[in-house]
Amino acid sequence: SQHKSLPVFAAAVGLCSVPVPPSGLNMCMSGSATSCEECLLIHPSCAWCAQEDFGRGRSLTSRCDFSQNLLKRGCDEHFIEYPTSSINVLQNIPLSSKGSGSTQYDVVQIMPQKISLSLRPGDQTWFSLQVRQVEDYPVDLYYLMDLSLSMKDDLDTIRNLGTKLAHEMGKLTSNFRLGFGSFVDKNMSPFSYMAPKYQENPCNGYKLFPNCVPSFGFRHILSLTDKVDRFNEEVQKQMVSRNRDAPEGGFDAILQAAVCKEKIGWRKEALHLLVFATDDVPHLALDGRLGGLVHPHDGQCHLNDNNEYSASTKMDYPSLALLGEKLAENNIFLNFAVTKRLYVIYKNFTALIPGTTVEILDQDSKNVIQLIIAAYNNIRSKVELSVWDHPEDLSLSFTATCQDGNPLPGLRKCADLKIGDTVSFNVSVEARSCPPRGTDRRFTIKPVGFKDRLEVAVDYECDCGCSRNAQNNSVICSSIGTYNCGTCQCEPGYLGARCECQEGETSNMFLSACRESEGKQICSGRGECSCNQCLCYESEFGKIYGSFCECDDFSCARHKGILCSGHGECHCGECKCHAGYIGDNCNCSTETSGCISDDGQMCSGRGSCVCGRCQCTEPGAFGETCEKCPTCPDACGTKRECIECRLFNSGRLADNETCQRQCKDHIIPVETLKTDEPGAVLCLYKTDDDCVMKFTYSEHASGQSILSALKEPECVRGPDALMVLVAVVGSILLVGLLLLAAWKLVITIHDRREFARFQSARSRARYEMASNPLYKHPISTHFVETDFSMYSKSYNGGLH
């Protein structure tokens, strides 16, 4: 009989790949296949001819070949066994556009919802799925607060948080519920004060705050409710406690808040947001052994009738793995709201727990509302796929197509999305082997934190249809073998195409059939010839096979001593790499997720991704994603954006989540900038208000980027127009007065000199008024020449 499976295509949902015969070596004929099933396992392009009279006089493995070769060699198409992979879409409800209203219980955010795969081992098949963050989706927010003594000022701040938070969240969703819980630490030594005087009041004798409540592990206070006034009322009743060591028991509380679904009140059809507020580090798994707790956490709910964690002093703290598993299992987004000094520690936790984020909390929690809104926007701005119950014999690889429409191989995450955006992912699936018959294989793909999921059922095309008509003790097989798919499977002790020989029979005719070519060793020196067939030796290194024992599964290239790097199968001297790996020894990964820098670029735009790692091509660039490059032309421009958002909350990255994700450098605000530090690059830029901002960029030996920046930009204010006018007019008047004064001075000096000259001339004059040649007497005497004698007589007579 014939067994052919044709792929089922679903437009815009999934496609199947078509096996391509490998170039070079004919893997099908050179393999060790003596049955149809073995042939199908060699390569997805191999086919088997079940025709009885096909290939008589030739080696048995000649029935295994490429389908086109079998047709050319005379095998009727009806007898060719060539199963192919296929996809069948079982449920494909369209995506929803809104999450509220009468349809909120039927909201669909992933499409399709159910598919079945029929996979042939080695055949790479792919399908696509779409994900959308719908608008106005219901939100359940549980506020989990550290009530240790150091959080007293924070407790005072959030006493009216409910009303304010509901008002702000009302702008994002019309269906919001709020709950509250608190934690301190295990009420046992050495984590808490256990002396009798501290039993009722651990703050006994503590001068700064003498009264507080006994320590406790976790206390669920308010189930999720839309009555936000209840939140305010319950918070106002709370009092802080006091534990002994610095770390807190917060992870105990997180796990209980995640798994106690009924008591907390998580809705199936809502987005689950758990805000974890603390000012110190958490205890981790194995810390409980300090108090004699050797039993690991069981991951179950242990809230008693008083809604307190009853197993706090019975089990150890949960591990990060268990915590991540339970959060994902219950579709909960965890947001760490921590003080600045703890940011790096909790940021490292987010890399180990999918679906978690971290925000910086002010010392008194004044920014808690902004922090929660930022966390919500952060969660709603990205989609990340996770795989549940992944079968070990399946290889999965993802290609994301985000808002820009460009495929990103190796990525299963899209970020910087807007609510209502739709993104798609192509998922490549390859079965590496055949599981035992009757094995049911299923796995689930779901976006982190979503209730929606894609369920995938897997069937394996490992059997040939002709095997259903096998004939035991067939005459064709000399009545001592089973005729199956054109060949005889002989009883032990018999050999030959028709079971016509017994083991041990040899002749020259049989020996010639065991040489690959004239002059070659019989069975390649690695087997014995018996009844025209090679019986290959066993080897401690692996399997020797082939018509002439010319192949084995251990003579392939190795990487660090591992055959085919552990990412492929050795077949007749060549590595057949698993999906996601290439190269002669399969040591080169095609994954590119490790090459994506924080700004979303491949190798920060300064290199290329080779074998899953960045090779920096820009001179001076280094780092895992070539993100470090003090000498690159764009270094100052890249770091400028981090200076703007981290120090002044401005610029393109001003959004808190984006800034924290892309700007991980250590920024040191300084009053005076030192520009003579070795290896430091001086950067400066002009701000919007025409000031100049200066900072230096250097790389520390630890690998961290150091930015030393002025606390405030240097600003040189422009001249005041009125002052300039007054100064100019005043200058003109002043110059005029100075010139006038100078002229007056010169005239005065000149006049004084002239007067002095006059006085000098006057003092030199030595004559009297009478002898003054210029003086003339008022009486004048005139002589007339007429009768001088008469005048004379008259004169004389007058004298007498």
Image: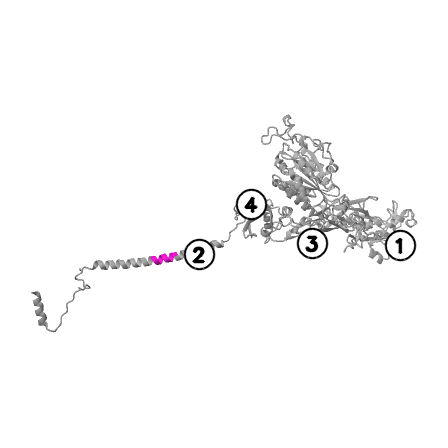
| Residue highlighted by disc 1 | 53
Q: CA distance from mark 4 to mark 2?
A: 44 Å
Please indicate whether residue 110 sits to the left or right of residue 503 in the image.
left
- The mark lying in front, picked from 3 and 2, is 2
Q: Earlier in the sequence, mark 3 or mark 2?
A: 3
Q: Position of residue 532 (x, y in %)?
A: 85, 51
Q: Earlier in the sequence, mark 4 or mark 2?
A: 4
Q: Amino acid at mark 4?
A: Pro
| Residue highlighted by disc 3 | 404
- The mark lying in front, picked from 1 and 4, is 4
- The mark lying in front, picked from 2 and 1, is 2
Q: Earlier in the sequence, mark 1 or mark 4?
A: 1
Instruction: State whether the magenta stretch is mostly helix, strand or loop.
Output: helix
Q: Residue furthest top?
A: 196
Query: Which numbered dot is residue 669?
Result: 4
- Asked whether 688 or 796 is in front, the reply is 796
Label 1 with label 3: CB-CB less than 8 Å: no
